[in-house]
Every structure is written in C-alpha cells, then in structure tokens.
Amino acid sequence: MKHRAFAGLALALVLLLPLGLAGCGGKQKTTTIRIGVAIYRQDDTFISTVVQSLEQYAKEEEQSRNLKINLNIADGRGSQASQNEQVDRFLAQGYDVICVNLVDRTAAAVIIDKAQAAGVPVIFFNREPVEEDLARWEGAYYVGLKAAAAGELQGGIVRDAWQADTAALDRNGDGVLQYVMLEGEPGHQDALLRTEYSIKALSLAGIETEKLASDTADWQRGQASTLMQQWLTKFGDKIEVVFANNDDMALGAIDACTGVGLTADTMPFIVGVDATPPALKALEDGTLKGTVQNDGAGQAQMMLKLSCALAEGQDPSSEVTLADGKYVWLNYTTVTKDNLAQFQTP
Amino acid sequence: MKRKNVFQLATLLVLGLGVLFSLVAFDNPYFWQSKQLIEVSVIIREADSTSWATARQGMEQAAADLDAELRFLTLSSPDSVEEQKDLLAREVAGGAQGIVLVPADPQKMEQQVKEATAKAVLVTMESDMAESGATACISVDNRAMGEALAGKALGKLAAGDDVVLLDSAPGSTGVSARVDGAEKLLKAAGCNVYRYTLSAGQDLSSLITKAIATQKPVAILAFDTAATEQAASVATNTENPPLLYGTGATNAIIASLEQGSIDATAAQNEFAAGYLAVEAAVKAVQKKPAPDIKTLTYYLVDRQNMDDADNQKLLFPVTR
C-alpha cells in the first residue's frame, strides 16, 4: 500500500515537471523598449518639435530593429517638483531608459542618483546638467548643442548684416548698434551664454554696441510681446536690433511691432534661435531676419539611438559618437532668407 | 525498511523542489499570467501630440489603474488616412489587444477598421465607427457642440453678418458634425455663412488667412484644437481681427482666451476622455462590462467664466 502511494505521488510529480519546464527554453527576449521622456514644458515650441521628432523616429526605429518602442511623454509644466515625481513614476514602473529635459539644470544630481539606484540609464537633453553632476554615474548621458555657439552664430547674422549695409541697421547714423535683448529663464545656462556670445560676436568684429534694455521673458512669446510693447513705447525707433534668446520670444517681439503698425521694412532687425516652423514662416515673411537652427530632429534621433542601445545592453558608442564617454554633441546652423529653403518642409 | 522510507521521502522532496524551481525560475506563463499587461495602442490623427497632453495623462492613469501597456502613435502628416491605415494594420499585427483610434476619415477607413475589430478591440474618439465594429465612441455630442458654439457667437452677431466656419478636418465625421450644427443655426439666424474646407496638402494657416482676407468676416468659428490655435495666431497679426470662437483647452488656447484673441471656446474634460477611452478598451479586452458612457459633457468657456472653479479644473487639470 505504502509502496503504491509512493509510486503514485512520484508519478504525479514527474508529470508536473513539464508544466514547469514549459516556460524554459530560455527566457523570452524583450521585444518592447519603454522610454520615459520628461520635458520641462510641452508648450515650448522647440521642445514640442523635439517630441514630434522622437515620436516619428520611434516608429522608424521599430521597423528597422523589429521591436516595439513605447514612449511616455510627461510634461513638467515648468515645475521641477512635478518632473521629479514623473521620473519617480517612470522608475517605479520599470522603464528601460529615461530621457530628461530638466526644468532646473541644478536638479540633475537628484535624478541621477535615483536612476542609478534603479539601474536605469538616464539621458539628459537640450538643457545641459552641470558637468560634475553628470560625472556622478557612468549611466548618465547628455545629448545637445553647445549654447555659446548659438550666440556666436546669432551675433554673426547681425554682424554680417551690419557690415553688408550699415545704413539699413544704423537708423540714427551714429555708428553705434542700439539693441534690446529678450532673455530666457533667469540663470539658465543657454540664456546666459547666448546673451553673452551674441554681443561678443559684434564686439570682436569691432562694432560698437549700446544696450537700451534687456529683461527675461522666460522663453515665452506672450511675455516677450509685453516687454517689447513697453520698450517700443519707451524707445520708439531708437531700437535698431532685437536679440531674442529663442524664436518664441523673437516672434513675441514681432507681434508687438505688428501691433503698433510696424511692417517687415520698418520694424527693428529681429533675430532668434531655434528655427522652429513658425520662425521659418516669419523669416519667409521678412519680419524675422535670421535665426539659428537648434537641431531638434537630430537630438531626437540621437536620443532614440542611445536609448535603444542602452536598453538592449549594447555599447552606446556603437550607435552614437560619444565625447568623454557621455556627451553627444550636435551643431547649430545659421538660417537666413538665403538658405531658408533647405530648412522648410516641402 | 526505515532506509527505504528515507529514500522514498528524499525522492519525493527532490521531485517537489524540482517542480517548484521550474515554475519560478523560467518565467512560466502559467505562473505569471496574472501579471501580463494588456497592450493598448492609441492612434491619433494629428502629427503634433501637444494638444493631447491632458488626454494622454488620463490614458496613462487608466493604463496604470487597469494593468495596461500604452503605445501612443502620431502621424507624420496630420489627417493622413493612408498612414493611419498602415499604423492600424501594424499595431494589430504587432499584437495590440486594444486600440483607441481618432479616425482621420471614418468612411475611408471602414474596411480597415472592420478587419482590425476582427482581431482586436477598437474604441474610437471624436467620430463614431460602431457600424464598422468599434466597441465604443468616446466623444461629446458633436452636432450639439457646434450648435452651442454658434449660439454663443450669435450673442454678438446680427442678421446679415458674415461668418466663416473652418472645416479643418473634412474627413472627420465628428468635426464635420460640429460644423454642420453651427452652420444650420447661423443660417437660421440670418447670417451669411461661408464654409472654408481644408483640402489635402493645404496649409491651415493659409486657408485661415485667405478666409479673413476674402470674406472680412465678423466672426470665425473653429471646430478642432489645431484650427483654433492657428486661427488665434493668424488673428493676432490681423488688423481689426474678427471675433473668434473655438474648440479645445490647450495652453495656447487658454492664453489666447486670456488675451482676448479668442472670445469663447467649447471644451471637454480631456483627462476624463482619455481615461474613459482606455478603460473602455481594456474592459472590452477583458470581456468585462464597459463603463456606462453616454456622451461627454462640453463646456463653453469665455473670459467672464474662465475663473469659475469648475472651469479652472477643466482648463488647468492637476498634473502628475
């Protein structure tokens, strides 16, 4: 009897074994990559173009790599606290990679430490963290462009126009370029460097400048328009050039000028940065005189390639060119009416 | 005898541990089945997902609450029917169990949707495709919304006034219903109504500029978010801009409302819309009773009532 009981039980266990081994034959390869993307503000025109490019490239990469790429875009709405919560959520939900467009560039260390603890690579983009923070962990990367270069190129547009036809810009004929400066967020590295280097490009060319006014418009069109209205009231046609740290603010300046009846020919020489679609339209209309392309599509492509490499456990340098093992640098390009056609979507 | 018992016990123990180990160690589907996420793909008709930010939050919340994995897909060019058809087929082939679709053109997509619903659950937003097999439609009463927007505009219009209606998504039966509703009411009130329809490949901004320049209307009505944003942008740069009544509650629209370039907007609770759409899809996949959805409520928001508590929640939902 006991012998039969033993035999019966043993047989049952042997029959159960295949059930367990059904899941064997190797763990199924992961076919879905989940990327959390935390952006500082989705209503920032340039950032929304980066997001659009990310979504389009994700579809292309899916086809070429034969896998699924699930993007989750979280809008920080200008709050670092909200963004930190979004990052926490991505990590808790087991995302493979997180991409972060910081609200506050000094907040990178907190995010890097969390990502490191979770073992999830983090790619910062467009807003460069402090170098020491990025160095905290080998799994932290940055994709972007060098801010000073944008300022140099923007200043170069004004310099070239001044040298080509000084009388057209020097309205009062005093040989001095009077300008106003619309700045991005206070303390933002890109705002500081673009402001500094745009004027430096003129001074290096021996052009004397006079700052009539400068103030922050937080990268936003509406705020820039309000500021420009005030400056037009105060300075009138003394304003010869308007520098804007980004296109949204340049367009705000144009809105203000249009609002008081100025035309493309009578408004100041206005320049921006980013080469967003609305800016390219303004360039075509002649109200914007120049901008500097911030390669949003290029950033999106590099972020995606880096993300896929990291998620699949590959060496990231096999997909992108890394400087110092961490940085993927892209280049700005000057855009004026002369080369506008290259940047317009057919 | 005792030795034999020990041997038998040891054998049973080894076999038992072996079964337990194989169940746990190799991701056995029988053991882990309850952890499988339901795959839901969302295919919108726009190329820019900015206007979907709030709805997407609702969708993500629903996905988190209901153990679903969300894929959010935009088009390369807005309202591209061919691309939507390709994406739909690709997602179904890729194993999507549920699909939330904002159809660019329900009539042209009828066959593809029927094929898709044979393999996956499909829920639409904005336009109804129940006749093609869609499980549910999450939308406002589009015709009623159009009528309400026209009714709001009539508060500042008189018989004989010229009014432009922007038919910015002619393929979308939902948006067209809004335009139809508004057109009927405005004509009945004696207004001269001009319907400007966006054709394939045409730039929306150019259409709006042409409409304003040609008709010099007293008012323009826009019936989706993209058209409303574009109309506000064009109107800002126009001398003596027309009254503008639109649809949606994106940040750009809210800013325009505050600045006075939009007189009123018809908005729905985007977060709820997104949540309900994913919930309906997931419940249908699980063969559970669907949420009791009638049509969504819409709200007419203007500068006078935009600070009301309910409208503030609508315009500025709590973000995560």
Image (cartoon, coloured by chain):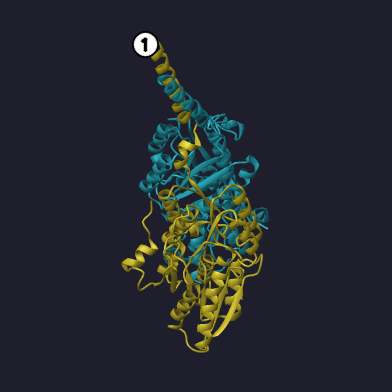
Chain colours: A cyan, B yellow
Question: Mark 1, residues whose alpha carbon is within 10 Å: few (<14), some, or many (≥20)?
Answer: few
Q: Is residue A223 visible?
A: no
* Quadrant holding the N terminus of chain B: top left
Residue A52 location (% of width, % of height): 56, 52
The residue where tag 1 is placed is: B2
Q: In percent of the image, x 43 and y 73: which residue is there? A: B264
**Can you say whether B240 is above or below A312 in the image?**
below
Which residue is situated farthest in the front direction here? A1
Residue A61 location (% of width, % of height): 62, 43
* Front-most of residues B141 and B262: B141
Residue B16 location (% of width, % of height): 43, 24
**Can you say whether A111 is above or below A175 in the image?**
above
* Front-most of residues A41 and A3: A3
Q: In percent of the image, x 58 and y 62: which residue is there? A: A282
The image quarter containing residue A286 is: bottom right
Q: In percent of the image, x 54 and y 38: which residue is there? A: A307
